[in-house]
Every structure is written in C-alpha cells, then in structure tokens.
Amino acid sequence: MSNVSSVMDTALSPRVESVVLSPHFDDAVLSAWHALVSKGTVRIITVFAGVPKPGFVTALDRTRGATEAAALVRRRRADDRAALAQAGRVPTHADLLELNYQAIDMPEVQDAIERDPARYVEIVAAVDGLGTPVDVIERAVGDWLDADIVYAPLGIGRHPDHRDVARLGLRLATRGCEVRFYGDFPYLVRYGPPSWLAAGPEAVCADAQIEDAFAALPATQGDFDRFIVELTRDEVDAKIMAFRRYETEFPLVDADFAGATSDRQRMRQEVYWTLRSGSP
C-alpha cells in the first residue's frame, strides 16, 4: 500500500471553503451532496482511489463485471469525474488502496468473500487490525486539507475504510478544525430511517449502528450536535443522476439497499454531526 498520495486530478490549490473527504468514489455524492452544490470553493478528495498493480481481479471486482482490478479502478475514476461534474466539481484522487486490494494477500479473507461477496463489509470488518492507520491517511491527503470546513464520514456501516477516514476527521476536530461528520448513505438507512428521521419498527437497529459508529471513532454521541439537511427537489434529481454515473456501482448498491439510492425521499435527507465546543 502506498503511504503517500502521488496521483490527483486537480492541481494543488490554495485554501478552500470546504473539503469533502470521500472514502470511496461515490460516498461524497451519496452522503454530502448539499456540500458539493454549496456556494464557494469545494475540494472533494477521494481517499482510497489508488490503482492496484495489474494482472489480478478480486471476488468483489467480479461482481462489478470486472476482469482486472487496475482497469476497474481506472474506470471508476472516470465515473467519479463524470458524477462530480454534475455538481460542477472535479475530484482529487489520492492513491491509497481500498481494503478490497489491501486484503488481496489474505487467502482466508478472499475465500470468504468468494463464497459470499454480498457479505464483503461484514467479512473485512471482522478481521482484527485490517485497515489503514490514521497517520497514513493524513500523510496521503494532508496537503489538501486547508479549508474552513472539512466534511468526513461518521463511519456508519462498519466499513473499515469509512471508519479510518472518520478517525482522521476526529483527529482534525480535536485540533480545532470545523469538521462535519456526515451520515454514510445508504448505510444510514440499512435498517430503515433512524428514530429522529422517521419512527418505524427498525428504528432501534438503525439507531444502534449510529451508536456503533461513534464508539468506533472512539467518541460519545452526546458530545456532538446533529443537523439534518433537506435537499430541494431539483437537488435530489441531480444527486440521483450523479450517482447513476457510477456505472459499476449503481446497480449493485441500489439492489443491495432495497432501492434506497433511487428513492427520492431517502435521498432527500442528509445529516451531519459536529463536535461541541469543549468536548474532548
């Protein structure tokens, strides 16, 4: 795994109003569209956008119709540019490898994914020590973090890549940066909306996974303030159109999450948390 970021799609630029840390190619579009279409300068950093070595394909890649991992990631980079163009933005691609490729030399993990690729996140989340240290992520993206506001995932859903970028967000917040921890969509609604969005029979499970995300930071939800953003109808339509530009991801994600990424009501609501002043 590379420890520095050497590949990017935009030249280094001066301080911006907002930076959005997107663990994977589609996370900023799905979870922080309101930030992407806000006024002012916005830099979107896709953290785990590294192109792996040529000549192999993972079990997870094959579910996307790929025959080689490197070619797939290059295609996903192109999709990222096309999707973010819908918001008038250009991505910055760091060269860290996502967990799918970090685990390529772990036969037991690969065998488990091969048997049931739908359980990918559950499988990798159960492997102790699998992930990317915060120091490594900060070195990879640190030159691009100069901003008034940094958006980072909260880490809902237990994906180690999301969790690790969230931990960088907490580090920045404790240094005094204004960090907005966005609710990772569609993991946010895996069990239906949480209780503070809509009461339902699955709210207990939905709320529990949010508590789990705070615990993994580690942090306490009581130290944060929560904000709900309601997108306009035009913004929702643009967001859905943008996500569908991720041609290898959209059909799989939409099916896996029971059509949540095609549901205008669910795609309309975004949420973020900020660390309260004086909290540890």
Image: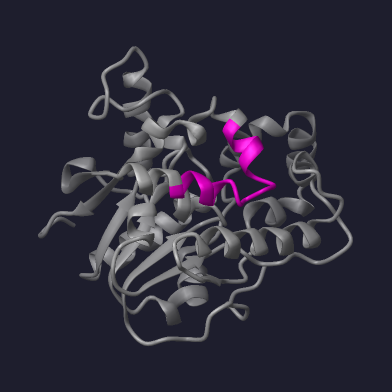
Q: Residue at x 71, y 56 (%)?
A: 101
Residue 96 x, y percent position in the rendering = 61, 67
Estimate the x, y position of residue 202 in percent, counting from the top left. 37, 17
Task: Name the one closer to the observer, 196 or 173.
Answer: 196
Residue 273 position within the rendered picture, expressed as x and y whole percent measured from the top left:
25, 49
Residue 235 placed where, x, y %?
37, 49
Quarter of image, res 44: bottom left
Provide the residue span drawn in magenta. Answer: 238-254
Say which residue appears at 17% left-offset and 47% top-offset. Answer: 223
**Could you tell whether 14 is left or right of 178 in the image?**
right
Classified by dominant secondary structure, the portion drawn in magenta counts as helix
**Image quarter of the N terminus:** bottom right
**In the picture provided, is 81 more to the left or to the right than 76?**
left
Against 90, residue 84 (above or below) is above
Residue at the top extreme? 201
- Name the residue: 59% across, 51% down: 130
> Residue 188 versus residue 104: which sits nearer the camera?
188
Q: Which residue is depicted at the point 72% across and 60% down?
A: 75
Verify whether residue 243 appears in magenta: yes
Q: Is residue 234 above or below residue 252?
A: below
Residue 228 lies in the magenta stretch? no
How many labels sit on residues?
0
Q: Nearer the viewer, residue 26 or 127?
A: 26
Can you say which quadrant of the picture contains the C terminus? bottom left
Image-quadrant location for residue 73: bottom right
* Residue positioned most to the left: 278
Q: Against 272, is 206 above or below?
A: above
What sort of colour scheme is used for the picture?
A: one colour
